[in-house]
Image: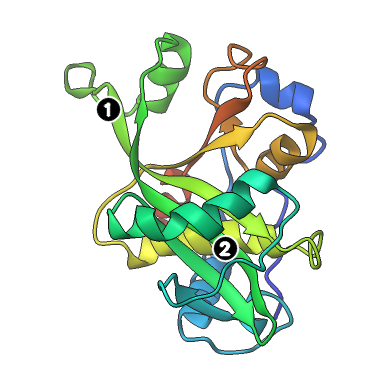
């Protein structure tokens, strides 16, 4: 069974312009989608092979003995991080990196760490995010997991692996973590391809148009709809 990211009614037909104007969207998470994420998470963690995609590769945590120099995703910054910085980040407990590989080497990787989503001063966004929390108990930060890096080998790009990696990370945060995280956040490279990728996977801009001219844009995925769907189904 291949995991497909299903479009929800609120996402269908939306363009980058729509997302620039939208503050918070309601995500519809079905029981079937939750089961798919659970299945993907368990399959990848157990290295079972059931379909031609992520589970076709070996999933592992980065080790110092792993050869990373031959990885190339077409982005110099991502390549440099994996080859030169990822091990040190891991040893210093700054970020953990996970790999997908086969007999030819690494085909994809992602790096995650604990973080917070911080109130940047836009009250309209912040109030909507925290509307179910009583005013006197609202905080300036929400717990989050940061997707620091995500790269797929340029040999197999455009095959849907990036989408499955996002689904896997959601599953790891919701089903494997022992602590709570409300959001998945990323400082997305401000180019059309990257922004479109995260938009298509449900991420939204935290600052609206305020960082439109910056080299990166802060984007977030609210995990609460997924959590609510788990508890309701």
Name the residue located 78 percent from the left edge and 33 percent from the top edge. Answer: 192
Residue 233 visible, this angle: no
Name the residue located 49 percent from the left edge and 59 percent from the top edge. Answer: 169
State which quarter of the image contains the N terminus: bottom right
SS state under label 2:
strand
Q: Position of residue 172 (x, y in %)?
A: 42, 64
Q: Nearer the viewer, residue 187 or 219?
A: 187
Q: Position of residue 224 (x, y in %)?
A: 42, 44
Residue 205 visible, this angle: yes
Residue bearing mark 2: 109
Judge whether 59 appears above or below 108 on screen.
below
Q: Residue furthest left?
A: 136
SS state under label 1:
loop
Left or right for 98, reference 197:
left
> Which is closer to the viewer, label 1 or label 2?
2
Question: Toward which corner of the image does residue 167 lie, by quadrant?
Answer: bottom right
The circle on residue 133 is 1
Q: Nearer the viewer, residue 62 or 21?
A: 62
Name the residue located 67 percent from the left edge and 17 percent from the top edge. Answer: 21
The circle on residue 98 is none
Q: Residues within 10 Å of mark 1 (few under 14, many from 20)?
A: few
Q: Position of residue 222 (x, y in %)?
A: 47, 40
Judge whether 57 appears above or below 114 on screen.
below
Q: CA distance from mark 1 to mark 2?
A: 36 Å
Q: Residues within 10 Å of mark 2 (few under 14, many from 20)?
A: many
Q: Nearer the viewer, residue 4 or 206?
A: 206
Q: Position of residue 15 (x, y in %)?
A: 80, 30
Left or right for 107, reference 187:
right
Q: Nearer the viewer, residue 67 or 162?
A: 67
Give whichever of discs 1 and 2 has the lower sequence position.
2
Q: How is the image coloured?
A: rainbow
């Amino acid at each position: 069974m291949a995991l497909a990211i299903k479009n929800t009614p609120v996402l269908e037909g939306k363009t980058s312009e729509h997302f620039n104007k939208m503050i918070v969207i309601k995500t519809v998470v079905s029981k079937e989608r939750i089961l798919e994420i659970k299945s993907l998470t368990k399959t990848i963690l157990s290295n079972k092979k059931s379909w031609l995609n992520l589970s076709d590769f070996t999933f592992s945590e980065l080790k110092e003995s792993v050869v990373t120099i031959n990885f190339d995703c077409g982005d110099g910054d991502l390549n440099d991080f994996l080859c030169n910085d990822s091990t040190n980040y891991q040893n210093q407990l700054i970020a953990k990196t996970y790999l997908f590989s086969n007999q030819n080497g690494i085909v994809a990787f992602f790096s995650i760490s604990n973080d917070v989503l911080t109130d940047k001063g836009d009250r309209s966004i912040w109030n909507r995010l925290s509307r179910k929390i009583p005013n006197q108990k609202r905080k300036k930060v929400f717990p989050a997991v940061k997707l620091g890096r995500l790269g797929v080998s340029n040999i197999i790009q455009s095959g849907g692996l990036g989408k499955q990696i996002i689904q896997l990370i959601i599953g790891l945060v919701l089903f494997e973590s022992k602590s709570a995280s409300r959001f998945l956040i990323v400082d997305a490279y401000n180019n059309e391809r990257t922004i479109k990728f995260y938009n298509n996977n449900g991420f939204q801009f935290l600052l609206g148009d305020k960082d439109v001219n910056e080299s990166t844009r802060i984007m977030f995925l609210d995990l609460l709809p997924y959590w609510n769907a788990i508890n309701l189904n």
